[in-house]
Image (cartoon, coloured by chain):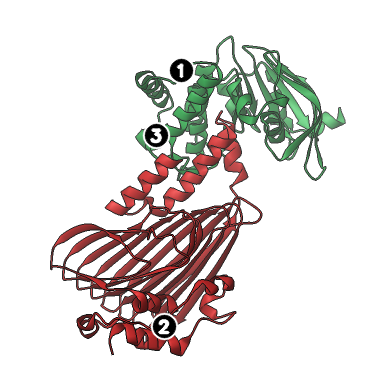
Chain colours: A green, B red
Amino acid sequence: MLSIQNLKTSLKDGTSILKGVNITVQPGEIHAIMGPNGSGKSSLFKAISGHPSYQIDSGSVILNGEDILGMDINNRANAGLFISMQYPIEIPGVKNVDFLRMALDSKRAYLGLEKIKDSEFNQLMEKYTSLLEMDDRYISRGVNEGFSGGEKKRNEILQMAILDPKVACLDETDSGLDIDALRIVARGINEMMTPEKSVILVTHYQRLLDYVKPHFVHVLRQGKIILSGGPELALKLEEQGYDWIEEA
Amino acid sequence: MNIQQKAYSRFESIGLPKARHDDWIFFPNSAFQKINVISPEENFSESISKEFDLGIDTEKNIAALIPLIHTRNTFLKTIDANAQETGVLKARDDFSHTLFHIQKGADVSLEILDNKNEHAFTAERLDFFVEENAKLELFFCNPLQNHSLQFRHVRIVAAAKASIKILGLQENTGCYRQSFDLFLNGEDSTVDFRLLNQLKGETEAHYHLTIHHNAPHTKNNQFVRQILNGKSHVSYDGAVHVGKDCTEVNSAQLINSILLSEEAKVSVKPVLKIYHDDVECTHGNTCGELDAESLYYLQSRGIDAKKAEEILLLNFASEVFSDLESSIGRERILHILANKN
């Protein structure tokens, strides 16, 4: 379970970004966060994951009973939080497969487990690269090196699948995807979902939500959740935009 | 007049560099106090001076002259045409001179080992005359500590279609200056110069490289990176000269530096002297810290900060050599980097 309570954050220069965000995500739930550009959606994910540009002014982020705000970035991830980036960066020279294995072994070390065996790792890789229709190119090249925007997003989902987090926060995973890639990525997300896990999606469009059905939809505006509802809210937003919320 | 006398005579006429000398502008002047050059007593190498032109009469670099003045003898080696050879060059004295004559079509890989004499001042000079279609790989990667003051001068004269590769991993401490005078005298001759400095403490590492494109269709590529910690200081003074009748010359110079401490320092001076229109010469220089977004990305996948930093630094370092074709020097350096980090 992830519980974000009264989270207020600002940039190092003092600019206030999140102004008291409250979201509780139970195991097995999918939440979608929508909102205009610049409303703080990506900042929310970065702040809870420990991005150095953000400072926490107040609030708490509890992941399975543990406040993760005092943890190092890597331990937040190892405790089960996964952030799929809106703009995944390239790390040329570090092979994707080596990176994935290093990340997985870091998590296993955190959990007190031994390093993963070759055969087990290879099976995992085969399973998820096949599910996400990724060829050897993705595996042998540097992390995101020379990938298109859509390929990078698909690689983020591969990382999520391999790392098997408790809560996955996916930041505009659907942007830059063609129709087929969107379907494949959505398949990856749905495959990861079990009754013990949760997903928070940030998206601008209903199209991803056609494939990954949310239980709750929230509207984030000017650093605050201003409206929450069921899946029908996303349809209304798609149709009418955000202005009606203020007017209401 | 033999080599020693000629070198001493030339040294006397140019003298020690004055403060703010253009070629020594980044070098700590205080280090000159350790240099004591005296008139040579012995005569040797008469035959060498007749067979090979070492450019003494026009030499402006004292680091090229001092080893000739003070060395006891020249190590002379000829690599036969079309031979394949690998070897190690190791100076036994404080001052040494090595001369290789690499004949047509030979393929040579040589590792330069550092002079282990821990005296106040050491200097070595290496000359290579590389004939047509021959290949020469020179590399150095064995760090020694606390050189008080070390000079190394490498002079290479390349004939047509000769291929020169110089690879360096420098992790020494102390104060040293390496100079390279590379003459591309034959058409289609090439130089690929790759250097990585990983320095700490108060190390002073200074590089002075001049590439003379004296023939058409010649190419040089310089790719230099440094990762600097402590109060270390690297300077790279890289000059490219393109002669009047040298068409379709291609020259590229790229210097990237990561400064891991506020007191580390890098100085870069690109110099282009081009006397022909049909050339392509580029140079670039970047300097900064480790990329914060890359560090965050790695950590967000569970990798701790120290390991994430190591990964990025290893990656930054390895890229200097990773795109090269496999060779003894390349594999040796990449192996050292991978096992160190």
- Which sits earlier in the primary sequence, circle 1 or circle 3? 1
Q: Which mark is residue A134?
A: none
| Position of residue A40 in the picture relative to residue B199 (left or right) | right
| Position of residue B287 in the picture relative to residue A148 (left or right) | right
Q: Please give the name of the residue rendered at 47% of the width and 63% of the height, measured from the top-left corner.
A: B254
Q: Chain of mark 1?
A: A
Residue A137 vs residue B203, the one in the foreground: B203
Is residue B35 depicted above or below B319 in this figure? below
Image x and y of residue A228, in percent:
76, 21
Image x and y of residue B57, in percent:
35, 88
Q: CA distance from mark 2 to mark 3?
A: 45 Å
Image x and y of residue B102, in percent:
20, 69
Is residue B86 depicted above or below B151 in this figure? above
Q: Amino acid at mark 1?
A: Glu
Residue A105 vs residue B173, the one in the foreground: B173
Image x and y of residue A34, in percent:
70, 29
Q: Chain of mark 3?
A: A
Q: What crowding class fits label 2: few (fewer than 14 Cα within 10 Å), some (14-19), or many (20 or more)?
A: few
Look at mark 1 in the image and give the residue it sits on.
A114
Observer-side mark, 1 or 2, equals 1
Look at mark 3 in the image and give the residue it sits on.
A139
Residue B237 vs residue A41, the one in the foreground: B237
Q: Which mark is residue B277?
A: 2
Q: CA distance from mark 1 to mark 3?
A: 23 Å
